[in-house]
Image (spheres, helix red, strand yellow):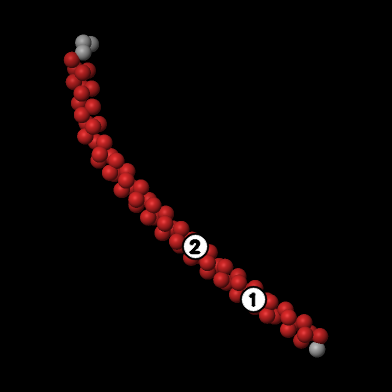
């Protein structure tokens, strides 16, 4: 009888803890997947922004490079 009374309070607690552990594992896996998705999105955005910056700066770099080459050819020695 004492065993039945002891299990009456402990068994529901054990089941609640097990359920909480499973819920915690599920939340952790969802958070990990969301983090991976966010990182992939951020990498794509960074790549697009970098490409845009390179495309924007390329004409100025080419012009400066040509000007430098012209100046070096004109200068003696």
Q: Is residue 49 left or right of residue 30?
A: left
Q: In the structure shown, which secondary structural element does the residue marked by tag 1 occupy?
A: helix
In the picture shown, does residue 62 fall above or below 74?
Answer: below
Number of residues whose C-alpha sits closer than 10 Å to that of mark 2, classed few (under 14), some (14–19) or many (20 or more): few
Residue 51, placed above or below residue 60? below
Residue 43 picture location, percent across and down:
38, 51
Residue on which disc 2 sits: 31
The residue most toward the top is 76
Horizontal arrangement in the rendering, residue 17 relative to residue 47 (left or right): right
User: Which disc is residue 16 wearing?
Assistant: 1
At 18% across and 20% down in the image, what residue appears?
70
Question: Considering the image in quadrants, where does the C terminus appear?
Answer: top left
Element at label 2:
helix
Residue 34: x and y in percent read 45, 61
Quadrant of the rendered image containing residue 69: top left
- For the point 20% across and 26% down, the residue is 66
């Amino acid at each position: 009888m004492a065993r039945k009374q002891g299990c009456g309070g402990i068994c529901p607690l054990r089941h609640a803890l097990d359920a909480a552990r499973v819920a915690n594992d599920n939340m952790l896996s969802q958070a990990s997947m969301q983090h991976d998705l966010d990182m992939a999105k951020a990498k794509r955005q960074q790549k697009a922004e970098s490409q845009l910056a390179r495309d924007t700066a390329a004409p100025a770099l080419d012009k400066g490079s040509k000007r430098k080459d012209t100046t070096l050819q004109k200068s003696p020695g």
